[in-house]
Image (cartoon, rainbow, N blue to C red):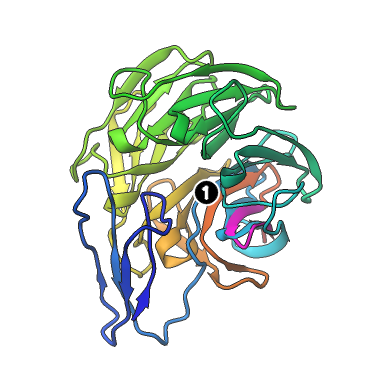
Amino acid sequence: MVSDYFSERGRALGIIIAITILGLLLIGEAGAQNSYEFKLKVPSSVQWNFYHPEGVAVDIAGNVYVADSENNRIRKFSSSGVFLATWGSPGINDSQFNDPAGIAVDSMGNVYVADSKNNRTQKFSSSGVFLAKWGSPGIGDGQFNHPEGVAVDSAGNVYVADSKNNRIQKFSSSGVFLAKWGASGIGRSQFRTPKGVTVDNLGNVYVSDTKNNRIQKFNSSGVFLSKWGSPGIGDGQFKGPAGVSVDNLGNVYVSDSGNSRIQKFSSSGVFLSKWGSLGINDGQFNFSQGVAVDSLGNVYVSDSGNSRIQKFSSSGVFLSKWGSPGSNDSQFNFPQGVTVDSLGNVYVSDSGNNRIQKFKLT
């Protein structure tokens, strides 16, 4: 039996993964409120694809970027999973990471990474050349306490889910502080550990308010517009929503992590569809994290507990998957963020390996 430990984002806090000859995948409800634990059973001979991917993003060309958190690296793939590049290692210097999480790509192909435990955001070229960084531990403007999600609007402004400070911070593309909103709580514009953030074509900002089990929508200045969601397993309900992404039509995709599924909504929060269940087969998930949508409407999901990336049509039809556990090229250790650039390259935040990997569209 293998013991591993996860908190709400799959970190080390208390879950047991057991391996049996039946290959059964079991889920156990945690005792504490808003704590999501999973018990997994798989044959010891199984070759796992990816090791805990979390954040995922897609550029306008369809390339996918994944935050492989336990490997502390970013990985880049094509939309079909062909490996392109990787960068990062453990540390505090430029281009080094400590648990990279969210990942996003701007219209110029620059890659932004929420370097969670280093409490900063790092910016790279599409080939992984270090460009800039900003942030330090704290509660002041431009400071962070475990940043998770990151998103970029059409003007190049960068939004960061400053998770443990329960707020969203907005920056210029060079890291100049512009605005912030949010506080701890359950009311409008308040958060409890916000994890994912995304921006639609109109500049509206969507935030996965993880421990409040809801999505909140704001304008680009942080003015509250709407919210939806409640705790549960029904349509439009959530259990620890993580990643959130918007397609070109304004549809919103949410990685409903604790319910092992993806939910799709209109821009106003009307439920449209869902797919996924707990398991290891195609179209099943174990602690899904990041979600990203390319220009064609294909949806990429960091299936963290199953250590892989899965690709679906906009209606949830399974298309492909790739990855395996480890530290070599195309292998992962808790991949988190994933994004796709305008050329279709796929970037992965390989968190446990402290690096970024890049994969090419074929």
- Quarter of the rendering containing residue 190: top left
Percent across and percent down for residue 197 are: 49, 33
1 over 37 or under it: above or below: below
Magenta residues, as a range?
346-357
Tell me: 309 left or right of 305.
right
Q: Residue drawn 40% across and 40% down?
A: 253
Q: Nearer the viewer, residue 120 or 316?
A: 120
The quadrant of the picture occupied by the N terminus is: bottom left
Q: Inspect this view and state whether residue 360 appears.
A: no
Tell me: 228 left or right of 351.
left
On whether residue 353 falls in the magenta region, the answer is yes
Q: Residue drawn 50% across and 67% down?
A: 51
Q: Inspect this view and state whether residue 272 appears.
A: yes
Q: Nearer the viewer, residue 328 or 180?
A: 180
332 over 29 or under it: above or below: below
Residue on which disc 1 sits: 55
On whether residue 75 falls in the magenta region, the answer is no
Percent across and percent down for residue 224 are: 40, 14
Q: Amino acid at mark 1?
A: Gly
The quadrant of the picture occupied by the C terminus is: bottom right
Q: In terms of secondary structure, what is the magenta stretch mainly? A: strand
